[in-house]
Image (cartoon, rainbow, N blue to C red):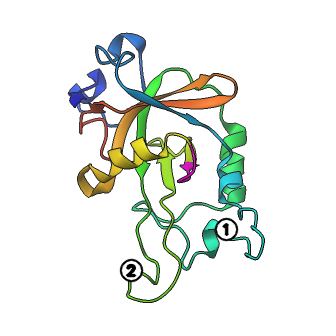
Amino acid sequence: MQRYLGRHAAHGLRSFCMLAEKQLPSGLRQSKSVIVTLQSASEQLKPSEARRGEKSVGVGDRGAGLVYRDGRPASSAALDSRERQADFPREGVWVLKIQPPLDVSSDSAGGIGRITPATLLLSDKKWNFVRFVREEDEGHFPLLRCALSADRQVAYRFAEEVEDNGQKLRVFTDILPDKAIAGW
């Protein structure tokens, strides 16, 4: 894997958000990537449909709920508000943070309970972009592999929003941003 140090990071600025086209690492657009269909974060947090003989279960219904290194997800109302204020697609390539949940379930404490689902949290530095990728979503496994192979099991990758039969996110999985523009 390659690391790329953005021009702004070389000057000591850590408020990196977007890269200009000429600042992109060489070969980024040709490198391996995964496409994730973007859905409303609040829609993904609502309880799933119950199957026959089962009770519907939402993300918050699983013990302590989903907890990430950055804390718990915001309320559905707060997530909806952020999404309504965002322009789609955002122009340019930016750094995406990928976090799997921490296992704070009763199973991890030796009890009997539900296993924590591996719902990934995707965000940008300023939390203007927040989405979840559930285990059954396309692109989940390559993103989970990125996170689990990274220090502290939190990955940083270049990403861009695209319009392709709906809102999508392209995450470039092979070229890593330098720690000077990631690691927040």
Q: Amino acid at mark 2?
A: Ser
For residue 123: magenta?
A: no
Query: Which structural element holds mark 2?
Result: loop
Circle 2 crowding by C-alpha within 10 Å: few under 14, some 14–19, many from 20:
some
Image quarter of residue 159 = top left
Q: Amino acid at mark 1?
A: Gly
Task: Pinpoint residue 130: horizontal percent, then vertical percent.
Answer: 56, 46
Determine the residue positioned at 26% across, 49% down: 150
Count of numbered circles in the view: 2
Quadrant where the N terminus sits is top left
Do the numbered discs 2 and 1 sit on residues whose CB atoms are within 8 Å?
A: no
Task: Pinpoint residue 75: horizontal percent, then vertical percent.
Answer: 66, 62
Judge whether residue 17 can be spotted in this image: no
In the displayed structure image, the side of residue 151 where residue 91 appears, left or right: right
Residue 58: mark in rendering: 1
Q: What is the span of residues highlighted in magenta in the rendered image? A: 132-137
Image quarter of residue 100 = bottom left
Furthest residue in direction top, as rendered = 22
Determine the residue positioned at 71% across, 61% down: 46
Sequence-first disc among 2 and 1: 1
Q: Decide: is 98 above or below 173.
A: below
